């Protein structure tokens, strides 16, 4: 196999307080304020002043090394601030490393943010040709792929509309279609696919798999462990800018889950978790209790009941909010989801504090670790108010039952009989 990406001792350091404000006048005002030991005059109300941290170093990446072979799909995972996006920006030549060596063989197409490389005033059609030209393709090559790109992105009706009028979902669909179809040797994809709907995400995963089968290389950053497990054979786990593990995907995911998912039975601080939604902050707490003893715990035996609570607070009235709990294995495989609308719960217009409680009468699961993501939103309008990934976990531990020694995930009640003929 041919090595297409080689990274040796890569590091990136940022020095706080040494970046300009954007204009000479503002820089001068900031300098004059510091000379007089005054606060930063450009600060917004309530914003923290980091001026006294000038010279402090933040290592976004530190001594990261790995190689990627042609046709390989490499997953990159880690918590917020681990250095994932910085790594992709360096590989995409958006920013330069502080030290280390990078060797990249082939054209790189990057999808790092919604609408990366798009000009908002240009139409979808014009942006396709612009991106193709940036990748070094001529008009004939782009013409050959044009219909396929538009069909994949499902934006045919709006292809001659300026992309500044696109929704975020349309933006992502077209941006991914362009990046994946214009035949780059290396495709770099950040977590932007989270903006698309579930059907489109599945479509993108399939396309990335096809890209790899064609002999091209994919670097994929995602908080969706199921997608990483499905698509990647190898993965890198970053922790505070350093390589915590570089191995096969199963091993890396198990380590990530065991170290990143909270083992507390009550969570009310979500600052380190990945969360999205229109009203981020609606979810105030997540609790786990034994459904029989009502004691807080993260350890259960097969068949025991579990009580899960999502504490929420709405500062303004909302109509018919719903809640959902999504249950995954420690390798990212979704095994169940529970939503309030499945029980036909209609709340009407509400505001203030409300708790959503779900009791699973029997955890018919084999011993291993499990992870929970929580969601609050408007199911009918398909709006996410607040969604927190992999927020809390629990473990099924062995009991004396011989069933617990079996392999698998779901412990379905069953019994053997001998029928003699």
Image: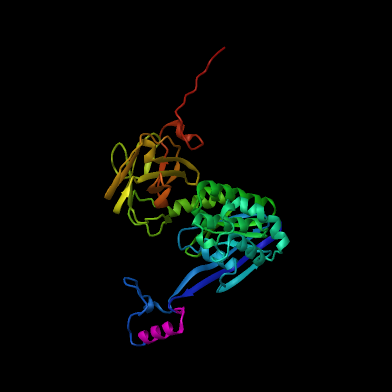
Residue at the far top in the pictured view: 421
Q: Depth check: give the residue in front, 315 or 55.
A: 315
Inspect this view and state whether residue 250 appears.
no
Above or below, 381 against 293 in this view is below
- In the picture, the quarter occupied by the C terminus is top right
Q: Residue at image x 41%, y 51%? A: 384
Q: Residue at image x 57%, y 53%? A: 157
Q: In this view, does 295 lie to the left or right of 259?
A: left
Residue 190 in the image, given as x and y percentages of width and height:
54, 59
Above or below, 149 against 327 in this view is below
Residue at the far right in the pictured view: 140
Query: Which portion, as a residue range, is magenta?
Result: 18-34
Q: Is the magenta stretch mostly helix, strand or loop?
A: helix
Inspect this view and state whether residue 318 appears.
yes
Residue at the far left in the pictured view: 352
Residue 41 in the image, given as x and y percentages of width and height:
35, 80
Q: How many circles with numbers are drawn on the protein?
A: 0
Residue 339 in the image, given as x and y percentages of width and height:
39, 41
| Residue 180 covered by magenta stretch | no
Type of colouring = rainbow
- In the picture, the quarter occupied by the N terminus is bottom right
Q: Depth check: give the residue in front, 249 or 218.
A: 218
Q: Depth check: give the residue in front, 29 or 248.
A: 29
| Residue 20 covered by magenta stretch | yes
Q: Is residue 114 left or right of residue 186?
A: left
Above or below, 155 against 107 in this view is above
Residue 126 in the image, given as x and y percentages of width and height:
62, 63
């Amino acid at each position: 196999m041919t090595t297409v990406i080689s990274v040796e001792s890569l590091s990136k350091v940022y020095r706080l307080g040494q970046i300009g404000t954007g204009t000479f006048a503002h820089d001068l005002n900031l300098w004059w304020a510091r000379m007089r030991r005054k606060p930063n005059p450009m600060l917004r109300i309530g914003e923290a002043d980091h001026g006294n941290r000038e010279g402090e170093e933040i290592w976004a990446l530190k001594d990261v090394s790995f190689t990627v072979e042609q046709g390989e799909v490499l997953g990159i995972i880690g918590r917020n601030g681990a250095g994932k996006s910085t790594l992709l920006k360096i590989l995409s030549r958006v920013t330069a490393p502080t030290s280390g060596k990078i060797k990249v063989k082939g054209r790189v197409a990057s999808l790092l943010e919604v609408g990366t490389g798009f000009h908002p005033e240009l139409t979808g059609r014009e942006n396709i040709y612009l991106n193709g030209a940036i990748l070094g393709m001529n008009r004939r090559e782009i013409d050959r792929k044009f219909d396929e790109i538009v069909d994949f992105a499902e934006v045919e009706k709006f292809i001659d509309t300026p992309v500044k009028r696109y929704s975020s979902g349309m933006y992502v669909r077209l941006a991914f279609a362009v990046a994946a179809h214009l035949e780059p040797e290396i495709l770099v994809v950040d977590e932007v696919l989270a903006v698309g709907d579930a059907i489109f995400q599945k479509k993108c995963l399939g396309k990335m798999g096809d890209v790899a089968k064609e002999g091209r290389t994919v670097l994929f950053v995602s908080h969706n462990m199921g997608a990483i497990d499905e698509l990647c054979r190898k993965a890198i786990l970053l922790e505070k800018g350093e390589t915590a593990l570089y191995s096969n995907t199963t091993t890396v995911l198990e380590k990530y889950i065991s170290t990143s998912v909270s083992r507390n039975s009550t969570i009310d601080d979500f600052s380190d978790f990945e969360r999205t939604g229109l009203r981020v902050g609606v979810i105030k707490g997540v609790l786990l209790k034994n459904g029989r003893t009502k004691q807080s715990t993260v350890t259960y035996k097969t068949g025991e009941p579990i009580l899960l609570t999502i504490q929420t607070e709405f500062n303004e009235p909302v109509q018919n909010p719903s809640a959902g709990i999504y249950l995954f294995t420690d390798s990212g495989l979704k095994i169940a989801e529970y939503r309030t609308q499945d029980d036909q719960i209609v709340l009407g217009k509400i505001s203030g504090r409300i708790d959503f409680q779900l009791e699973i009468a029997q955890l018919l699961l084999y011993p291993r670790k499990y992870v929970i993501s929580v969601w609050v939103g408007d199911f009918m309008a398909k709006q996410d108010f607040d969604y927190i990934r992999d927020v809390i976990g629990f473990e099924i531990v062995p009991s004396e039952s011989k069933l617990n020694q079996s392999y698998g995930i779901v412990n379905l009640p069953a019994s053997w009989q001998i029928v003699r003929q």
